[in-house]
Image: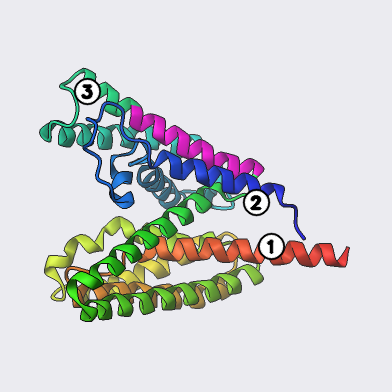
């Protein structure tokens, strides 16, 4: 059996991460934080940590796909971004300030924090503290835990969002009747289908010398288009978004596979991820108010990470058995 020490370290780091999502913003008036755990996270010091860090990592990864290799090697290895590198963390600091100021304005409008400058610095400082805590938790996982710290944190957040969405759907059934369960049931089937397809694709990629990033990145990069923001225009613009999504997935996957020369994986990666992207667009068009409880990009990334961890576990077990 593989060593338990990395597993214990990873679990403890994830516990710290979830604890940070429950620590309220400094200076927030007592009694103003809603009781729902999913809403609590929006008022926590780590409220913007994962989204801002993820956005910064996506942008640097996107830049690495188009820049010469002699430049990109300063940002990561083998064409893949280092989430703990100077470029990503620098962008995170810059973007976090804009998001923090936006939260300050919202809280001041609701009279939930003191007036500036004291209220501003309390909120901004506590949000930066939350970012530092999340990044440190991921670094501990990367260095002393199971590795892939950024991806494990992302997968943990995806699982948390799924659990929150499932809980809210179940709680609505007694109020809205059993017919209300039909739509969540259909969405649950879609989630299972996406998860199964992603797991099968990730195993195929890993067994052919690829990396989980080849599966996780294309839809995350594609998410920069924020297609869900165009719900009001669905399904009129669906005929535009579907081919555009497929083309972009093909281009992103080609750029990622170019350096390792694993073009044999291009067709399965593009095919599976394009089908998942089309499924999300179709659900967005069919259900205006309710789609998947989180973007498919996060669902795919989380499923790919969990599959890679299981694959690593099997490989370590097999190696120890042979030894």
* Residue 131 visible from this viewpoint: yes
Whether tag 2 and tag 1 are in contact, CB under 8 A, the answer is no
Q: Nearer the viewer, residue 17 or 220?
A: 17
| Magenta segment | 126-144
Counting from the top left corner in percent of width and height, residue 278 is at: 32, 76
Per the rendering, the mark at residue 119 is: 3
Mark toward the start of the polypeptide (2 vs 1) = 2
Prevalent SS, magenta region: helix
Callout in the foreground (2, 1): 2
Label 3: which secondary element: helix
Counting from the top left corner in percent of width and height, residue 110 is at: 12, 35
Counting from the top left corner in percent of width and height, residue 297 is at: 38, 63
Q: Which residue shows up at 31% across the image and 64% down it?
A: 293
Per the rendering, the mark at residue 313 is: 1
Where's the C terminus, which quadrant? Answer: bottom right
> Mark 2, residues whose alpha carbon is within 10 Å: few (<14), some, or many (≥20)?
some
Q: Nearer the viewer, residue 171 or 25?
A: 171
């Amino acid at each position: 059996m593989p060593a338990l020490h990395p597993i214990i370290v990873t679990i403890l780091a994830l516990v710290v991460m979830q604890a940070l999502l429950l620590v309220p913003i400094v200076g927030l008036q007592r009694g103003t934080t809603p009781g729902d755990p999913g809403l609590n996270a929006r008022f926590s010091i780590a409220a913007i940590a994962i989204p801002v860090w993820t956005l910064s990592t996506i942008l640097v990864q996107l830049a690495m796909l188009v820049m010469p290799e002699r430049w990109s090697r300063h940002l990561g290895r083998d064409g893949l971004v280092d989430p703990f590198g100077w470029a990503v963390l620098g962008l995170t600091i810059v973007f976090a300030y804009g998001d923090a100021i936006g939260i300050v304005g919202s809280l001041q409008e609701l009279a939930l924090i003191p007036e500036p400058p004291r209220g501003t610095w309390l909120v901004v400082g506590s949000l930066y503290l939350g970012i530092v805590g999340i990044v440190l938790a991921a670094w501990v996982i990367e260095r002393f835990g199971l590795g892939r710290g950024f991806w494990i944190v992302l997968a943990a957040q995806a699982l948390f969002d799924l659990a929150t969405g499932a809980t809210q759907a179940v709680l609505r059934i007694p109020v809205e009747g059993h017919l209300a369960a039909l739509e969540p049931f259909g969405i649950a089937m879609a989630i299972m289908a996406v998860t199964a397809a992603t797991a099968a694709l990730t195993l195929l990629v890993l067994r052919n010398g690829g990396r989980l990033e080849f599966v996780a990145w294309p839809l995350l990069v594609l998410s920069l288009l924020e297609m869900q923001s165009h719900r009001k225009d669905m399904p009129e613009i669906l005929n535009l978004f579907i081919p555009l999504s497929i083309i972009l997935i093909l281009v992103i996957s080609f750029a990622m596979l170019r350096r390792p020369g694993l073009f044999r994986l291009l067709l399965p990666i593009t095919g599976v991820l394009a089908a998942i992207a089309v499924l999300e667009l179709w659900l967005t068009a069919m259900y205006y108010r309710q789609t998947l409880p989180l973007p498919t990009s996060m669902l795919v990334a989380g499923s790919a990470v969990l599959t890679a961890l299981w694959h690593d576990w099997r490989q370590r077990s097999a190696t120890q058995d042979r030894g």
